Amino acid sequence: MKPTLIDSDIVSYYLNGNADIYGKIIDYMEEYRLLSISIITYYEVLWGLYHKNATRKIRYFENFLLRCEIINLTPESIEISARETARLKQQGITIGTGDMLIAGTALAQGFVLATNNERHFNHINNLEITNWKKE
């Protein structure tokens, strides 16, 4: 298994008790001590939980974060995200800012991206994707 950045949807599946995702996370943590998530994923998941007023899941997410390394944006990740956004926009393809920043983070750090949102991320040059929901 390669070093992997976990996308927001995979975290959400985990928080909702998806057994397959739980198994993938356990397997990953046997090889790597910590999970890696983007600061953008941290924001997206937390925002969604606050929006739903999901107090119990917020605590569950806080416990999940104890097993995570939160990867911040860097000038390199911003550069990659901006360049890819412009390239895709010129082709008439629009991808949300959050997804582009997560992809840029994965590329800048040399991570594979674990996501079930292949439709968006497949357009991004040089981004290796793994779908923990389907595998």
Image (spheres, grey):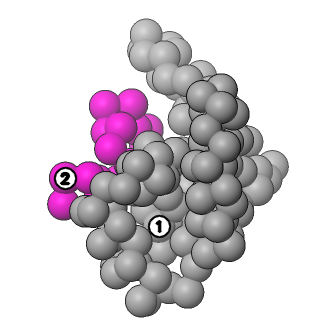
Q: Nearer the viewer, residue 6 or 81?
A: 6
Q: Is residue 4 left or right of residue 84?
A: left
Residue at (48, 74) in percent of width and height: 3
Q: Are there few (<14), some (14-19), or many (20+) residues within 10 Å of tag 2?
A: few
Q: Which residues are magenta?
A: 115-135
Q: Quadrant of residue 116?
A: top left
Q: Is residue 2 left or right of residue 106?
A: left
81 vs 70: above or below: above
Please indicate, yes or no, whether residue 40 appears anywhere in the rendered image.
Answer: no
Characterize the magenta stretch by its predominant secondary structure. Answer: loop
Q: Quadrant of residue 54?
A: top right
Magenta segment includes 76: no
Q: Is residue 48 left or right of residue 7?
A: right
Residue 27 spot, x, y in % from top left: 34, 81
Residue holding disc 1 = 4
Q: Amino acid at mark 2?
A: Lys
Residue at (55, 71) in percent of width and height: 35
Q: Nearer the viewer, residue 35 or 121?
A: 35
Q: CA distance from mark 2 to mark 1?
A: 16 Å
Mark 2 in CB contact with mark 1 (< 8 angstroms) = no
Quadrant assignment for the C terminus: bottom left
Q: Secondary structure at mark 2?
A: loop
Quadrant assignment for the N terminus: bottom left
Residue 96 spot, x, y in % from top left: 55, 24
Residue 77 spot, x, y in % from top left: 69, 49
77 vs 132: above or below: above
Q: Nearer the viewer, residue 91 or 130?
A: 130
Residue holding disc 2 = 134
Residue at (37, 56) in percent of width and height: 17
Q: Amino acid at mark 1?
A: Thr
